[in-house]
Image (spheres, rainbow, N blue to C red):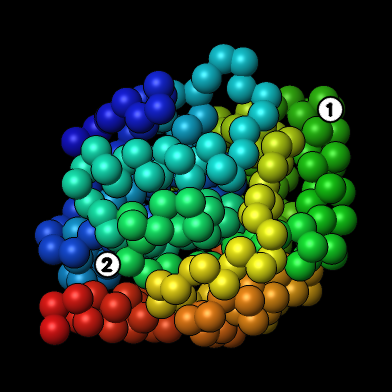
Amino acid sequence: MSGLVVNGVRIHVEEHGAGEPILCVHGAGGSALAWAGAVGELERRGRVIVYDRRGCARSERPEPYERTSVREHAADAAALLAALDAAPAAVIGKSYGGTVALDLALRHPDRVRALALLEPDAPRELMPGALRLVDGLREHLRQVAARDGMAAVGEALVAEVGGEDAWRSFPEELRRVITGNGPAILAELGGEWWLEAEPTELAAIDQPTLIVAASDSPPEFRQASEALAEAIPNARLERVGGGHIIDPTDPAVLGFIEDVLAATRA
């Protein structure tokens, strides 16, 4: 399968393996290719669904595409799961994709079996430091686009959130995708990139939830993860080494997915 129209936008989607569904939601600037190194492990555990979010890579980019929101991407994810008859799914989200997964659980709880969130964002009130950090990042990336062109935005983003060595660690195909995603990155950071919910609403998330924070990430990102872990009733916080670009095949993530899916078969 290569594409489905959801909410008026053609979305590139791929499926691997069989069994209980596992939906993977990539972060800002990414695509389904961001999961290439994880699919082999995940498909041993279930039916893996990876896709390019609207505006990114092989999915349709609305014109003009100057602003989007986490809520809009969560609506796409809900429609995608319905179209694929893949609900409820264990949802793994990276960074911005983790915030999308949270919004999906809040607004479409019937579509979500469990959440594995790799440094997502929280409601604004719970992460004042991250708000200031991302405001500065957004302005920096706009300056990069004005000075060096839109194709320079993706590499600049990766360097800021993952460190100077992160870009070189990516496969060439993924670097090309991120380079082409400059407009999507600015649209995502130019809209509501945080979780549009009151902190008290998080108590409604009753699905098993794993939140993963990285030891070398900016402290502002860890602040959001820690706040979410305190606010979500069934959440567990796991700390791993490295930076913000967390490996979804970390044993903590794989073990959590195994446990969740095993419980559905019991």
Q: Amino acid at mark 1?
A: Arg
Instruction: Indicate the position of residue 140 as horizontal and vertical percent values.
Output: 84, 42
From the viewer's side, name the closer residue of 56 and 40: 56
Q: Which quadrant would the C terminus be assigned to in this image?
A: bottom left
Q: Residue at x 29, y 46 (%)?
A: 81
Q: Residue at x 12, y 59 (%)?
A: 18
Instruction: Indicate the position of residue 22 as horizontal and vertical percent values.
Output: 29, 61
- Can see residue 239? yes
From the viewer's side, name the closer residue of 228 and 164: 228
Q: Which residue is mark 1?
A: 147
Q: Compared to 67, does 225 lie above or below? A: below
Q: Compared to 49, does 138 lie above or below? A: above
Q: Residue at x 73, y 36 (%)?
A: 190
Q: Is residue 209 left or right of residue 19?
A: right
Q: CA distance from mark 2 to mark 1?
A: 41 Å
Q: Residue furthest top?
A: 63
Q: Which quadrant would the N terminus be assigned to in this image?
A: top left
Q: Which residue is mark 2?
A: 42
Q: Compared to 224, does 260 lie above or below? A: below
| Sooner in the amino-acid sequence: mark 2 or mark 1 | 2
- Can see residue 151? no
Mark 2 neighbour class, 10 Å CA radius: few under 14, some 14 to 19, many 20 or more: many
